[in-house]
Amino acid sequence: MAGLLSKGSIVTTLTDLLTPGAKALHPYQPGKPVSDLAREMGLDPASIVKLASNENPLGPSPMALAAMQDVGSLSRYPDGGGFELRQTLAEQLEVEAAQITLGNGSSDLLDFVTRIFVQPGDNIVVSEHAFSLYGLNATAVSAEVREAPAKNFGHDLDAMAAQVDERTRLVFITNPNNPTGTWLSEAEIRGFLAQLPAHVITILDEAYFEFVDEAEYPNGVRLLADFPRLLVTRTFSKAYGLAALRVGFGVSSSEMAALLNRVRPPFNVNAPAQAAAVAAVKDQAHVQRSITANRLGMKQLIGAFEQLGLDYLPSVGNFICVRLQNAVEINQALLRRGVIVRALGGYGMPEYLRVSIGTEAENKRFIDMLTEVLQQGEAV
Ligand SMILES: *Cc1c(COP(=O)(O)O)cnc(C)c1O
């Protein structure tokens, strides 16, 4: 020790101490919070419309809110095993509770699976225009991120398969995809999984599963019987309207779940979140109301885009991408009017804005402000 110290240190900054992976990282950019915009623009928070993070505009089930209030003492740690929530999900999904891994949001699962299977020099395969968190996690562990070009803004599974080699550990499929709203059929996904070598694990991210109403759209959980090297992720942040509580989960073989649990922090899902999630699963009527509202809101936005002569990407999610020549400037003009949507430069789509489906009134406000910006030519 004395010898080491006497040599002196060549480290000058904290950044020098970062791992190679962390050196290459930039923090994830979330949708702008209402409170930030209110501060920056001197606006009344109540006047701001946020359609930027694909949240449920109806909010959570009233039963979830009631259950959350009723958790008992906050001085006690939550159930670290999440027994009741895993049991409830197991019944709903017709799997064993041992196949379910709880996460502080499904983002947690994306992190766990990367940490246990990917090491420096390995690679992961993602699609162009996919959720940035997959690559962020892999970069953090000094792995290579291989991005396959998209086809019509959706995943090109042949292009993704072509990227797989002996160092590939994970492949990420988002179905439907965020931000493009594209989706893959059961036949397409089965065909892809059947050709993957055994050293590759596929993550099927189904954050928007509940919204899809297409006959050929698969339930990933049903694929586990045929494809054991699969991890399906779902969340309470979107259709269930519980984004603030941070609850998500993975469904996999019980073998994979046990491995994921090796890196899961012991109390990663808090007690109010567990209680609310259990009640939310039991209130499927609220989920149905949310899905119906989403369908109507989607129609409302599409109708407006068509009237304004704007191109959009047909979406099966609770969000839609609209094409605008000056998307960056229009986004700024919308922010000045208290409307928050998502610019997609970071997703390789600089000409698009992603708009989450809001309530009828929120959608109308967005449409009115967009119309005003386009008519005034302010952003052109
Ligand atoms: C919103 C989203 C998630 C879920 O995030 P949580 O951590 O569960 O809130 C996962 N994947 C995609 C593609 C998403 O859009």
Image (tube, rainbow, N blue to C red):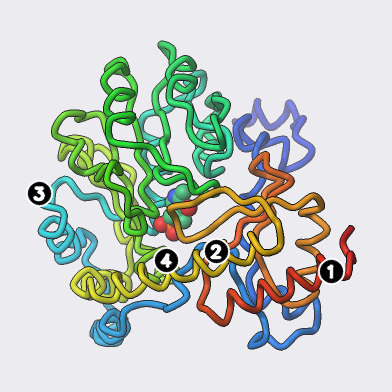
Instruction: Provide the residue designation for mark 2.
Output: 356
Q: Residue 375: which disc?
A: 1
Where 72 falls versus 311 (above or below)? below
Q: Residue 96: which disc?
A: 3
Instruction: Provide the residue designation for mark 4.
Output: 295
**Disc 3 residue type (three-letter):** Glu
Residue under the image location 48 percent in, 67 percent down: 55
Task: Indicate which label's residue lies in the foreground, 3 or 4.
Answer: 4
Q: Residues within 10 Å of mark 3 (few under 14, many from 20)?
A: some
Query: Which mark sits nearer the N-terminus, 2 or 3?
Result: 3
Left or right, 199 with respect to 147, comes to: left
Query: Which mark sits nearer the N-terminus, 4 or 2?
Result: 4
- The spot of residue 85 in percent (x, y) is 19, 64
Task: Indicate which label's residue lies in the foreground, 2 or 3.
Answer: 2
- The spot of residue 104 in percent (x, y) is 38, 59
Query: Are the residues flagged by discs 3 and 4 in contact, CB closer than 8 Å?
Result: no
Q: CA distance from mark 2 to mark 3?
A: 34 Å
Mark 3 CB near ligand 1 (8 Å cut): no
Query: Which mark sits nearer the N-terminus, 4 or 1?
Result: 4
Where 12 falls versus 357 (above or below)? above
Left or right, 122 with respect to 189, comes to: right
Left or right, 95 with respect to 111, comes to: left
Q: Quadrant of residue 361?
A: bottom right
Q: CA distance from mark 4 to mark 1?
A: 28 Å
Task: Indicate which label's residue lies in the foreground, 4 or 2.
Answer: 4
Q: Residues within 10 Å of mark 1 (few under 14, many from 20)?
A: few
Label 4: state its secondary structure: helix
**Disc 1 residue type (three-letter):** Gln
